Amino acid sequence: MTFKFKILLFSYGFIALICSCLTASEAEIGLDVTADQSDFNLQTSSSRLQGNIILKHLGLKVTGDEAEVIAASESQSQLFIISGEPVRFELKAATSNMSATAGQLTYKPYLELIEIQDKVSITQTTADTQFQISAEELQITLKMGQPLQLIAKGVPIVFSQQLTDRKIVINADKIDWDAESHIAFLSQATVID
């Protein structure tokens, strides 16, 4: 057994411990985290992971350089704070795929919430369209592992979409996109066509 394998076994044991806050159906779906090194703090119920971080849950995959894992408590849900140069994020949904890069990503599996900060660049691809958003902050709310809502903040937010005959670029202060209706609300938007 190699040293790395021992650390992975410890990481899985720790994840099993902190996943106890999830409901049975969510825990059964599986949450996998691997890293090269792991340190656990019993007093704070948190773990520090370093090197080649990979988090997989539902259709989500996040990779980064470092992570802090905080167990759920009465006042806070479980969360994973992953940082890197860059953090990479992929979400494979039923009708689309999302991918992003950023400096930091916070994932709250029980709340189905992803918060991405620091030079965020995200792309969503469906069968017939693709768009990109660049922002300082991005929040994605999920429902059963599928995107439900996307909120982008930071000045300026740049939204771009390649059409058949041209590319549309929109600068805005905020974007609030609803996945079910496919409607986006843009605040203080300027279209550059």
Image: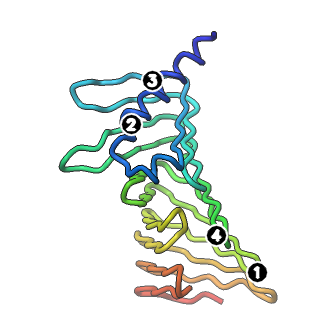
Residue at 58% in and 32% down:
52
Q: Which residue is mark 4?
A: 124
Instruction: Tell me which corner region of the image, top left, top right, bottom left or bottom right, holds residue 81.
Output: top left
Mark 2 or mark 3: whose residue is earlier in sequence: 3
Q: CA distance from mark 4 to mark 1?
A: 11 Å
Could you tell me the amino acid type at mark 3? Answer: Ser
Neighbor class of circle 4 (other Cα within 10 Å; few <14, some 14-19, many 20+) is some
Callout 2 secondary element? strand
The reply to whether discs 4 and 1 touch (Cβ–Cβ < 8 Å) is no
Could you tell me the amino acid type at mark 4? Answer: Gln
Q: Which residue is mark 3?
A: 38
Q: Which residue is mark 2?
A: 68
Neighbor class of circle 1 (other Cα within 10 Å; few <14, some 14-19, many 20+) is few
The answer to whether 98 is drawn above or below residue 21 in the figure is below
Residue at 60% in and 18% down:
5
Q: CA distance from mark 2 to mark 4?
A: 27 Å
Callout 1 secondary element? loop
Instruction: Tell me which corner region of the image, top left, top right, bottom left or bottom right, holds residue 132.
Output: bottom right
From the top left corner, tell me how far across and down residue 138 is, in percent. 45, 65
Could you tell me the amino acid type at mark 2? Answer: Glu
Neighbor class of circle 3 (other Cα within 10 Å; few <14, some 14-19, many 20+) is some
